[in-house]
Image: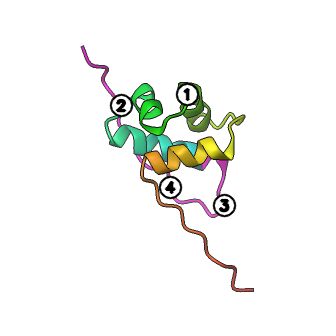
Amino acid sequence: MAKKIKITDYPENENELTTQYLGKFIRAKRTQSGLTSHQTALLCKVPVDVITKLENSSGGITLDSFLKVVNGLSINIQFEKDSK
């Protein structure tokens, strides 16, 4: 029997980018895509603990792993030059 995935809402937009916001956003993207943590890890070519650490904001992952997850889930990140 397939594991039931609890859909998570996207977090409210915060003024400051935090690990908690990123974790909530990644979990929301994953669950709204109908993916389990294991499926996401396979899709993104990272170990399952990377997904868990990202979603729980517990740190200990590399930038390379973070980018694999962002790209694997088709999350768009934009940077803007400060107007100062």
Residue farthest to the top, as pictured: 1
- Secondary structure category for the residue under label 3: loop
Amino acid type, mark 4: Glu
Depth order, front residue of 22/37: 37
Gap in angstroms between the C-alphas marked 3 and 2: 27 Å
Gap in angstroms between the C-alphas marked 3 and 1: 28 Å
The residue at which mark 1 appears reads as 47
**Other residues around mark 1 within 10 Å, as few (<14) / some (14–19) / many (≥20):** some
First reached walking from the N terminus: tag 1 or tag 4? 4
Numbered label attached to residue 12: 4
Amino acid type, mark 2: Lys
Gap in angstroms between the C-alphas marked 1 and 4: 28 Å
The residue at which mark 3 appears reads as 16
**Other residues around mark 3 within 10 Å, as few (<14) / some (14–19) / many (≥20):** few
**Other residues around mark 4 within 10 Å, as few (<14) / some (14–19) / many (≥20):** few
The image shows residue 54 at horizontal and vertical percentages of 59, 38
Gap in angstroms between the C-alphas marked 2 and 1: 21 Å
